[in-house]
Amino acid sequence: MDLPPSIAVFYEELMDSHPYPFVLCTPEGKPWRRSNFRNRHWRPVWDGTDGDRQVAPAILPEFTFHEGRHSHATWLIEDNIPEVARRARLGQKMKGIARVYDHITPEMERAVIQALERRWLNSLNALRPTERTKLGEWFPHLRQTRPVGELESAPRTVSIAQVKPRPS
């Protein structure tokens, strides 16, 4: 599955950080069992807990991967992505006769990537300056620059310093 350029770099860095074929894997390089990964890693981060004790403010309490798929689909609808492209992105088949006649085109695939890249840039725009600074400390590649608004031919990074501010 294609990723927006500014998000793909996170996966590339993660893949370069270990010799295994999986993005998220056990220390031995095996794929996580869904329930173990969720319970040992995602739930504590989202809920801000360590076992039974609260250690940090909750980020996304009660959020699930499936809800993430719903959000993804909703964003694509908001961005006017055709149903055939949304279903292809989510790994779903078209229903009925549309399965025979509707096909995704390269232009639709580009539209999906561009829409998601714009969403990423807008999420950076929504950060406060202190949050951008912290993000730059955690992910140094975000401090690199590229022209604002360049979506297709840009390097696989976007500078948090170069994000165009939203008009007030």
Image (cartoon, grey):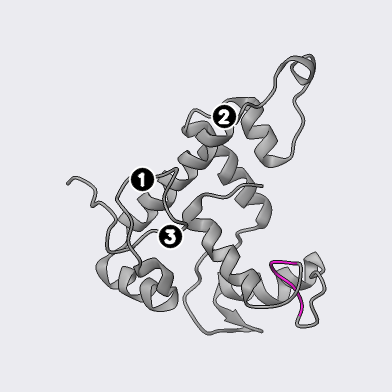
Which residue position holds label 2? 108
Q: Secondary structure at mark 2?
A: helix
Q: Secondary structure at mark 1?
A: loop
Which is nearer the eye, 139 or 78? Answer: 139
Which residue position holds label 3? 157
Q: Secondary structure at mark 3?
A: loop
Mark earlier in primary sequence (3, 2): 2
Q: Position of residue 69 (x, y in %)?
A: 64, 47
- Residue at x-position 77% and y-position 30%: 93
Q: Position of residue 39 (x, y in %)?
A: 72, 73
Q: Work out whether 136 lies above or below 168.
A: below
Tell me if residue 38 is in the magenta stretch: no
The type of residue carrying mark 1 is Glu
The type of residue carrying mark 3 is Thr
Q: Work out whether 6 lies above or below 81.
A: below
The type of residue carrying mark 2 is Met
Extent of the magenta region: 22-26
Mark earlier in primary sequence (3, 1): 1
* Mark drawn on residue 150: 1
Q: Work out whether 66 lies above or below 45.
A: above
Q: How many C-alpha atoms fall within 10 Å of the one at disc 3: few (<14), some, or many (≥20)?
A: some
Q: CA distance from mark 3 to mark 2?
A: 23 Å
- Residue at x-position 31% and y-position 55%: 125
- Is 84 left or right of 7, judged from the image as shown? right
Please identify the dominant SS of the magenta region.
loop
